[in-house]
Image (spheres, grey):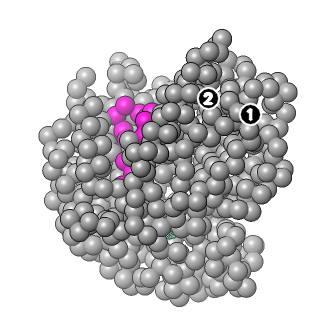
Amino acid sequence: MATRIVSQEEREKQNYYMQCVRDFNSGRAVRPAACIKTFGCQMNEHDSEKLAGMLERMGYELVPDETAGKYEGRFCDLILFNTCCIRENAEEKVFGHIGALKGAKREKPELLTAVCGCMTEQPHVVEEIKRKYQNVDIIFGTHNLHRLPEFLYGALIDGRRVCELSHTEGEVAEGLPVKRASAWKAWVTIMYGCNNFCTYCIVPYVRGRERSRRRSNILQEIEELAAGGVREITLLGQNVNSYGRDLEEPEQRESFAALLSAVCERTAGSSLRRIRFMTSHPKDLSEELIEVMAKYPSVCNQLHLPVQSGSTEILRRMNRRYTREQYISLVEKIRDRIPGITLSTDLITGFPGETEEDFRETLELVRMLRFDMAYTFIYSPRVGTPAAADPDQVAEELVKDRFSRLLELQNAISREKNEACTGKTFEVLCEGVSRTNPARLTGRTEGNKIVNFTADGICAADAEGKFAKVYIDAAQTWSLEGRALEWEEL
Ligand code: 5AD
Ligand code: SF4
C-alpha cells in the first residue's frame, strides 16, 4: 500500500477540535491536569511526546507519570495509557494500572481515562477492556493517534464513550505538536510499522506495514533540533534498514545508509554530536551502512543487532531469514570495519521447538560474540501469531532454567566487558542526577554504556546535556562508575 501523508483537510479538522477542547478547558476554574503513562519501546515513548504536545495545545498541564495519575494529591483530569503488547507481562501491567483506577471516578467524577497504543490494535483486547473496564472512556489505536483532539472532544464535550479503532493504515501524520521530554536528546521516527512477520512477533499486526517518512520532512525536523541545541538524536523504526522501500516517488526511494549520511552532512558542525539508530534487522544491514557508520564521527560506535537465537533451525522457525553463520560473519565484518564498536542484542529463550541442543547453540554464540549487552526474554505466545499456534511449546520449567543460564552467562560477559573499561577515560553526555545515588551524576558513553560519576562542585542542572571526560574507576554489570575530569562547556 502506498504511504500517504494525513491530508491537510484532516489536519484542519483536528486543529478545529483542538481549539474546541482548548476553549472548553479555558473555561474551567483550575487548569486541567493530564498524565500519560507510557509502556514499551522508544517508539511509544516518542508517540507519547506527540500526545503530550497535542494535550498541551489543548490547555492541559502535563504532570509526570510517577504519581499514579495523581496531581497535588488529587486525580488528574485525564489519564492516558499508551500501551505495549510485545509480551504478556506488558499487557498484564497495563490491565493492573487501569483496574486500579476503577473507583477513581467516585473521587473525581470528571476524570477521563483513555487507552491507546499497541494493545488496542488487538480486537480481543478491546473487547476485554469494554467488558471488564467500564471506567475507560476513550479507546483508540496506533494509526489514529493524530485524532486525539477529536476523540477527546467526543468524550469531554459530548460525554460519549469513544472507541475508535484504526481503519486506515498506511498514513503518516506530519507536523503534530511535540512536547519532548528532553531539551538535549531527541527521538526521530523515520518509519512506522514492520513487514517482517517474525513468527513470534505481534508488531506487524498492531503497527501495520512499513511506512517511511519523506526524507525532506525527516531532515527538516533534525535540522530544527540541531539548531535548537539538541546534542543526541536516535532515528527510530522497527527495522530502520528497510527505510525508503515503500516510498512511491523514485527520487525519494533511497536507502537508510543514504539517509543517515545526509543527516550527518546536514548537521556537521552543529550542536548535534551523536546520532544513533534502532532497530537494525541483520538480514537488511548493508555494507553501505557499515561504511557510513565508519565514515562519520557523529554516528555513534554502537549498534543494536537482535539475533534472537543462535540456532539456524530456530531462526528458520522464527522466519528471521538469516543463519547463525550469516549473523556471525556480519558481526565480524562490522567489528573489522569499526573496531571497538559496542554491540548489543536481543535473545528469546523457549521459542516453540527449541531443544537443549538449540539452546546450547545460543549459549555458544553468546560466548563467542561477547555482546556488551543483551536483552533476554522468555518467549511469550501472542494471539494471532504463527508461533502461538505451534504445538511444540516448551515446558515452563525448561524455559526458566534456560533463561537463568543465559542470563548468568551474559551478565558475566557484560561485567567483564565493563571491567575492561576501567582505567580509561570516556566522553560522557550527562543526563542529570543518578537515580541510584543522588550525590552522583549519570550519563552515557558513545557506546551507550551508562556511567554514574562524581563531579565536584558541579550542579546537575548545569551539567545536563553537557559533555564531560570521565575517568572510569569501577565496573558493574549494567553500568560504569567514575569521576569527571573536565567539562566541555562549563
Ligand atoms: N516473546 C518474547 N520476546 C519477544 N520479542 C518480540 N516478541 C516477543 C515474544 N512474543 C522480543 C524480541 C524483540 C524485542 C523487542 O522483543 O527479542 O527483538
Ligand atoms: Fe517484530 Fe521481527 Fe518486525 Fe522486529 S523485525 S518488529 S521482531 S516482526
Q: Is residue 76 magenta?
A: no
Image marks 2 and 1: residues in contact by CB distance under 8 Å: no
Q: Is residue 188 magenta?
A: yes
Q: Which residues are magenta?
A: 176-191
Quick check: can you spot residue 405? no
Residue 289 position within the rendered picture, expressed as x and y whole percent measured from the top left: 25, 66
Residue at 23% of width from left, 34% of height from top?
A: 227
Asked if residue 94 lies left or right of residue 239, the reply is right
Instruction: Tell me: residue 254, above or below residue 142.
Output: below
Camera-nearest residue between 175 and 196:
175
Quadrant where the N terminus sits is bottom left
Q: Secondary structure at mark 2?
A: strand
Asked if residue 56 lies left or right of residue 25, the reply is left
Sequence-wise, the earlier of marks 2 and 1 is 2
Q: Amino acid at mark 1?
A: Gly
Residue at 56% of width from left, 27% of height from top?
A: 20
Asked if residue 190 lies left or right of residue 315, the reply is left
Mark 1, residues whose alpha carbon is within 10 Å: few (<14), some, or many (≥20)?
A: few
* Residue matched to label 2: 34
CA gap between label 2 and label 1 equals 18 Å
Toward which corner of the image does residue 454 lie, by quadrant? top left
Camera-nearest residue between 58 and 13:
13
Q: Amino acid at mark 2?
A: Ala
Q: Secondary structure at mark 1?
A: loop
Residue 416 position within the rendered picture, expressed as x and y whole percent measured from the top left: 43, 58
Instruction: Tell me: residue 441, above or below residue 46.
Output: above
Residue 339 position within the rendered picture, expressed as x and y whole percent measured from the top left: 24, 63
* Residue matched to label 1: 159
Camera-nearest residue between 16 and 490:
16
Mark 2, residues whose alpha carbon is within 10 Å: few (<14), some, or many (≥20)?
A: many
Quadrant where the C terminus sits is top left
Residue at 58% of width from left, 17% of height from top?
A: 26
